[in-house]
Amino acid sequence: MPVRNKGVKPVRDVAKRTKRGRRAYIVPTDRNANGIVAGESFLERNHLLLLSLMPGFTRISDQSICVDLENENLLISRQDLPKKDGKKAVAYTADSEIERHDGQIFICESKPSAFLEKHADKHARAERILATYGKQFITFTEEKFSPVFISNLENLKKALSPAQKERAAGACEKVGIALKNRKRWPTLELKESGALSNADIFFGLAYGVLSADLSENVFSGDGWVNAAHGSLDHLKLMDI
């Protein structure tokens, strides 16, 4: 399993959570200087996985910012929180942070929808403070993250692995030939026509040779893929 570079720590180190029975979920990404980001829940991991794949973003960090809700400040570490009567100020630690290609920064919270109401006031306070620093606050839930969608994200991530680069080039060439200038194919028909594997299809989806509705099972009897002509718009899976 990848490890974090020495001397580089997030605001709230999820590795410590493993000592209390929680697992740190690792997502490799070249959008972070450490080569990885980590979440302390499967939900966080799924959101980080999505953010590592969506085009248009240049940087992603896990737990990179702490909001002092009482004094309305942004801090590098929870250890920097001021104390009053021996108690630290009330704070909010973001689950992740992403930077879009235009420089806009988004602070992201991963939270099951059932708990949104409970934390609504805290999130509203954090959102207001972050806005004064030019940062947008967004909340991700389990909505849209079906088992099929998560599986598709995982397969796309595998297809984009640097270790698969040579294989990906060959697969994309095969897929391009198999398309035969048709704009749309039933996935199973395209596979049979071009002697393609499931992995070949995902290489095509990952590198913009193909596009598809990734909320659906691409390989079901009624699954379809389209010629993408280099576009990665089908990977813009959330409106951010």
Image (spheres, rainbow, N blue to C red):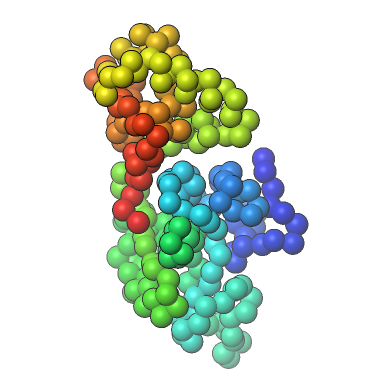
On the picture, is 134 further left or further right than 12? Answer: left
Which residue in the rendered view is the most extreme toward the left?
Answer: 222
Which residue corresponds to the image point at 57% horizontal and 77% vertical from the top-left? 75
Residue 65 horizontal/vertical position (percent): 54, 69
Horizontal and vertical percent position of residue 86: 61, 87
Visible in this render: residue 101?
yes
Location of residue 17 with respect to 218 vertically, above or below: below
- Name the residue at the right extreme: 6
Can residue 20 be spotted in the picture?
no
Q: How many marks?
A: 0
Q: Nearer the viewer, residue 31 or 221?
A: 31
Residue 216 relative to residue 168: left or right? left
Q: Quadrant of residue 77?
A: bottom right
Q: Quadrant of the N terminus?
A: top right
Of 91 and 211, which appears nearest the observer? 211
Query: Furthest-front residue in view?
Result: 181
Q: Quadrant of residue 164?
A: top right
131 in relation to 185, above or below: below
Q: Quadrant of residue 139?
A: bottom left
Pick the quarter of the image with the C terminus: bottom left
User: Which residue is at the front of the view, 85 or 108?
Assistant: 108
Towards the viewer: 227 or 152: 227
Identify the residue at horizontal 60%, vertical 25% (top origin): 166
* Rendered location of residue 59, percent (x, y): 53, 56
Q: Residue at x 64, y 76 (%)?
A: 79
Which residue does the image show at 65% across and 52% down from the upper left? Answer: 34
